[in-house]
Image (cartoon, rainbow, N blue to C red):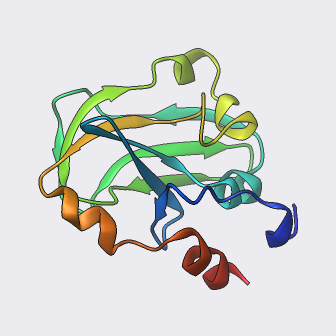
Amino acid sequence: MKNVNELHFPEECRYTVEHIWIRPDGGEYVVGISDFAQDQLGEIAFVDLPAPGAHHDAGEAFGTVESLKSVNELFMPVAGEVIAVNEELESTPTLVNVAPYGQGWMIRLRPDNPANVDTLLDADSYRAGLA
């Protein structure tokens, strides 16, 4: 496992204490797990994601990520509708390890209230909470 200072936390993302990131992308938002979370989990073996069209409340479990070490629930950063899932993760779950903010994204989301994204932790606050 890496030292927190060696991990990457993009400034354009917002974060939850459950190690989920969210960032705007056009009129949608992209969601995944942070570099810290993937580092703690180790090699990702399986990702279980919801079907597009599913609606979840903030803090509600929307899927799981399984590593060689454990199975962890994924918690929705804000309430909204899942509009797409990263189907590449079915065959290549290690994309989460290699590029957690890029090819390892998990879901695309249409938030009920996009302003709620701004209430989440910024990169500096998230990093400070890990130290």
> In the visual, does 103 lie left or right of 94?
left
Residue 75 percent across, percent down from the top left: 38, 58
How many labels, in total? 0
Q: Residue at x 68, y 44 (%)?
A: 67
Closer to us: 20 or 102: 102
**Considering only vertical position in the picture, is 102 above or below 7?**
above
Closer to us: 69 or 102: 102
Q: Quadrant of the N terminus?
A: bottom right
Q: Residue furthest left?
A: 112
Residue 22 percent across, percent down from the top left: 42, 52
Q: Residue at x 69, y 36 (%)?
A: 99
**Considering only vertical position in the picture, is 118 above or below 91?**
below
**Considering only vertical position in the picture, is 88 above or below 29?**
above
Residue 56 percent across, percent down from the top left: 19, 50
Closer to us: 14 or 58: 14
Write down the quadrant of residue 78 in the picture. bottom left
Residue 24 percent across, percent down from the top left: 37, 45
Q: Quadrant of the C terminus?
A: bottom right
Write down the quadrant of residue 127 in the picture. bottom right
> In the visual, does 66 lie left or right of 113?
right
Q: Residue at x 72, y 39 (%)?
A: 97
> In the visual, does 69 lie left or right of 88?
right
> In the visual, does 74 lie left or right of 97?
left
